[in-house]
Amino acid sequence: MDATNRQTQPLPKIEIMAVPDIPMIQAGDDLSAIIFERAQAACLTFEDHDVVVVTQKVISKAEGHSVRLGQVEPSPEALEVAALVRKDARFVEVVLRESRGVMAMRPDLLVVENRLGIICANAGIDRSNIEQGDDVTLMLLPQDPDASARAIQEGLQSLSGKRLAVLIIDTLGRPFREGVMGMAIGVAGLDPLIDMRGQTDIFGYVMERTIINRADEIAAAASMLMGQTTARLPVVIVRGATYWPGAGSSRSILREPWKDMFRPKEYLRLGKAK
C-alpha cells in the first residue's frame, strides 16, 4: 500500500464519551430511562456495538443495596477479625456477611473472596460518593451484576433501537500491583474474553495461551474518564472497541481455584455469603 492509499484509510480509533448530568440516583430509579434521557439532552446518540459502561455504585443505589452501620451487630468472629485488622467491628461484620472467605489480613487491610467470587479488599464495600446522614451508610456491590447489566442493556436497546453491550464496573486493586483500576464485575451483550489461541501473529507464530480480557480493558479505559472523586461521571459510552457479541457473563473472568497458584491452601472460610 502506497502513501496515497494509506491516507484514504480511516485510522483505527476508540471514542470514550461521558453521559453528563446523571442525577443523584435513588432506590427504585429507572437507570435505562435516566441514561437515555441524559444522553439525548447532551445530543449523544447510541450506535450499534457501543458499550455502555456504568459504575457499580449507581447500580447499588438504584437497587437499594446498602446498609446503615448503626444497625449492624458484630458477631464474635467479626470482633476477632476487627481486632487484628484494626477496623470498626461493625464494618468488618458487613464485610464478612458479603464474603465467602478471608484470603489475607493485616492492620488496616482485609482481603476477602466476596460472594461474587472476586478477590478484593473489604468485599468491595465502601462509603465514598454516598450521601451521608447521622448514620454511616455503606454501599454493597450489586446482588447480581450480570442481571443488572442485562436489565440496562434491554432497556437501552428498547429505547434506542440499537444493539448494545453493557458493563458494570468497579475500581479494584490487583495482586502485586500498586493502585486501583476499573474492572468489569457485570457483563451483558459481549463475551468478556477473546480467545486468541490457534491464531498466528505477523510472523506466523501460533498463539498457544493468549486470552484477552476485553471487558476489563474497556472498563479500565472508561474509568479514566469517570474519575474517582468529584467528577460525577458514572456512565460512559465506549465506541469503536472490538469485541465478540454474545450473552457473556462476568463469571467467565474469574479464574478457577484449581488454576490459582497463589491462593492460600487454607484460609478462613465463611458460611454467611450465599
Image (cartoon, grey):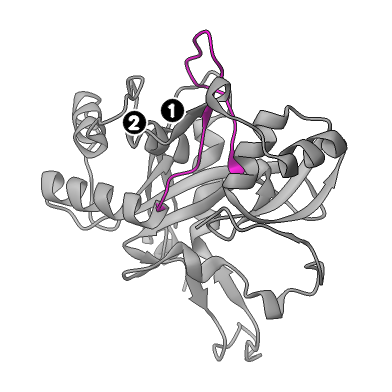
| Secondary structure under the numbered disc 2 in the rendered image | loop
Residue 122 in which image quadrant: top right
**Residue at the image point whose x is 33% and y is 55% from the top:** 147
First reached walking from the N terminus: tag 2 or tag 1: 2
The main secondary structure of the magenta stretch is loop
Label 1 sits on what residue type?
Leu
| Secondary structure under the numbered disc 1 in the rendered image | loop
Residue 255 in which image quadrant: bottom right
Q: Which mark is residue 112?
A: none
Q: Are marks 2 and 1 in contact (CB under 8 Å)?
A: yes
Residue 199: x %, y % from top left: 54, 88
State whether residue 79 appears in this view: yes
Residue 150: x %, y % from top left: 29, 55
- Residue segment shown in magenta: 124-144
**Pointer 2 residue:** 19
**Residue at the image point whose x is 77% and y is 30% from the top:** 87
| In-front residue for pair 205/10 | 205
Residue 240 among magenta residues:
no
State whether residue 165 appears in this view: no
Q: Which mark is residue 233?
A: 1
Label 2 sits on what residue type?
Val
Residue 208 placement, left or right of 85: left
Residue 143 among magenta residues:
yes
**Residue at the image point whose x is 76% and y is 43% from the top:** 110
Residue 118 placement, left or right of 236: right
Image label count: 2
Residue 219: x %, y % from top left: 51, 49
| In-front residue for pair 70/121 | 70
Residue 190 placement, left or right of 122: left
Q: Residues within 10 Å of mark 2 (few under 14, many from 20)?
A: many
Residue 184 drawn above or below residue 237: below
**Residue at the image point whose x is 19% and y is 34% from the top:** 33
